[in-house]
Amino acid sequence: MLNSINMKEIAMLAGVSASTVSRVLNKNGRYSAETEARVLEIIRKYDYTPNMSAKGLRTSRNSFVGIIVPDITNSHFASLVLELEKAMFEEGYSCMICNTNENALLEDRHVKALMAQNARGIFITGTHIYEKTKNIPFIYLDRRPRGYHGNIFMIESDNTMGGYLATKELLDMGCKHPAILSAPNVDYNQRARFEGFKKAIRERGMTRGDYDIIDAEDTLMSTSEKAVMDAISDGVRFDGLMCTTDTMSAGANVGLRKCGISVPDDVLLTGYDDSPIAEVVGSGITSVRQNLSAMVNTAVSIFLSMLEEKAPEQMLYSIPVTLVKRDSTQKRSMK
Amino acid sequence: MLNSINMKEIAMLAGVSASTVSRVLNKNGRYSAETEARVLEIIRKYDYTPNMSAKGLRTSRNSFVGIIVPDITNSHFASLVLELEKAMFEEGYSCMICNTNENALLEDRHVKALMAQNARGIFITGTHIYEKTKNIPFIYLDRRPRGYHGNIFMIESDNTMGGYLATKELLDMGCKHPAILSAPNVDYNQRARFEGFKKAIRERGMTRGDYDIIDAEDTLMSTSEKAVMDAISDGVRFDGLMCTTDTMSAGANVGLRKCGISVPDDVLLTGYDDSPIAEVVGSGITSVRQNLSAMVNTAVSIFLSMLEEKAPEQMLYSIPVTLVKRDSTQKRSMK
DNA sequence: ATGAAAGCGCTAACAC
DNA sequence: GTGTTAGCGCTTTCAT
């Protein structure tokens, strides 16, 4: 059984031409209800599935899309990809997943491979902008590429709002001298969360002396642990720490513990992403939850309307976030 | 720029026929070094990439494979997929990722879609066995499908060994009355880890009265938390708990804490998978690390040799695991 | 060493 | 409402 049955054979068995089978399959009309029934019956009986390579060649459009992310191992991207794959599969598309490991060259190679395969569209969280090539819709997800100029379809979550909410929570819970642990060189989102931090700070009339900044080179747990310990041994003192990632908050938590500082008694702590880690570190770390379903739904509907050549209303979508409160920002017992 | 340049045009520009271009591209010989150089130069100059749909149609084989897993959000599968995608991309293949959410019907739909698209092979962690169809190699990964008969290519990690190592660690660290928290109805792996537990138990000459069994319906954190709390309120007492998953150990940890039981002072705890969670819960949970690279390398090389019609030596590969020690099994302070 | 020609399985004019 | 026909861009005999 090397090759399964093809359209021509189905046509013969149903006593019609291949065109008719094709029309029935694609619901293109111009066939009688009777013919339709007969064709579908034969198709069902022989368990026929059209050859997608042939269809793809003929129409220059395949029924799959590419999803390019930095690292599927990051729970944020894993969830994003899961949702996207589910939604797209229900629309009849399969998903090619590509990890770039933050490597721009690898990103380019993946884009090229996807285009060679006539991917129907590409959802990408990356660093480059790909000007509309070969008519393949590009949808930029989660993170602004370098040189972002507003003229691409971009769905991001409201990172400034997230940074603001987390910081406000610290302040509302009695924090007098907050600090932020971020990795501003990593991407735009990191910087946006920082902006949110500053916004909350300003709102309270606090000035530069009232808060501290701890920078990390990357978002690794170990890097954050070290950054926090170094800051403390350098004499930096704070009673609330806003971290721009849950991995970072987990690292920070370890660093604090090793310095004999207790969460939330001495320092309130917030993370970002509401990842499983945030649930299990200590008695839970307060974290900013991104609305992945909304991001994915927006992305999918933009994709679909681009297929129909209908321009979506906006180019930039900023999806609101919410705060998930946990023990790490419990109001401190008076002392 | 709707359609990029095609092979015929490249041929014209190079002053040769399409056949020659094809031969050069596929390194099929029968062309002069001179011709080759000229063709490659034109290809490079025009940044030509062959249309994979046409190639796929003609050869009935595409340069992508399918990867079917229950849930990419599970860090174990995320890592597996990441490694597999990286290794396959370097071999020139893209990867279609499909999540089944443990739904066998969805699994079947995914397999069908992949076959319709002429996937070159399918790596699957699922519940069904797909007898070699359309000559597409199936490689079963990580978990034995229902009705496993030994006549499929199966790469698993040595779950019995893992269960044994974790349990032995508990006993070596002074545990006198161990318990196991597992979800035996979930899959074969859960039961294999249980076997490992019993093996370690027997080795010490312990009998049924010397240990306890806590069953969970599934591997969710909340389920484990509840299972542990219920067991304790039912009077079950133990001083070491071997959990068959890291999510479960995290849930168990919460359950224990809520019962006022301290890890590792009152109860030693082990998990399974060495996921990021195991690093951050408490001061770290001892966990069994699976050798994902070895699993992936084996899977890829089996895939490649199947393409060359060379039968791999074995059908079943069981990859050894290692134990990662953390604070949750620190030798208890004498008391 | 190279080219001509056929055809993979499908779709989309175009005819009737 | 249905069939005929002509390719989509490649690979692969078969000639030469």
Image (tube, coloured by chain):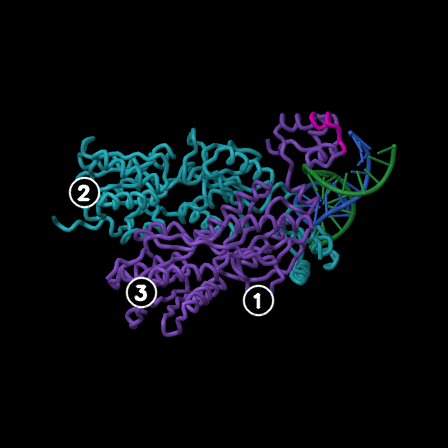
Chain colours: A purple, B cyan, C green, D blue
Same chain for marks 2 and 3? Answer: no
> B325 and A144: which one is in front?
A144
x, y (%) of residue A265? Answer: 27, 59
Find disc 2 in the rendering and name its residue: B175
The magenta-colored residue range is A30-37
For disc 1, the chain is: A
Same chain for marks 1 and 3? Answer: yes
Please give left or right for residue C13 compared with residue B194 in the image: right
Does residue A258 show up? yes
Label 2 or label 1, whichever lies nearer to me, is: 1
Find disc 3 in the rendering and name its residue: A239
Label 2 or label 3, whichever lies nearer to me, is: 3
The residue drawn where x is 58% and y is 64% is A148
The quadrant the N terminus of chain B occupies is bottom right
Label 1 or label 3, whichever lies nearer to me, is: 3
Q: Is residue A134 magenta?
A: no
The residue drawn where x is 63% and y is 62% is A151
Check disc 1 and give the amino acid type: Gly
First of labels 1, 3 by sequence position? 1
The residue drawn where x is 63% and y is 27% is A44
Check disc 2 and give the amino acid type: Cys
Q: Is residue A33 magenta?
A: yes
- Residues at discs 2 and 1 in contact (Cβ within 8 Å): no
x, y (%) of residue A262? Answer: 26, 60
- Residues at discs 2 and 3 in contact (Cβ within 8 Å): no
Check disc 3 and give the amino acid type: Asp
Does residue A117 show up? no
Find disc 1 in the rendering and name its residue: A147
For disc 3, the chain is: A
Packing grade of label 2 (10 A; few <14, some 14-19, many >=20) is many
> A282 and B5: which one is in front?
A282
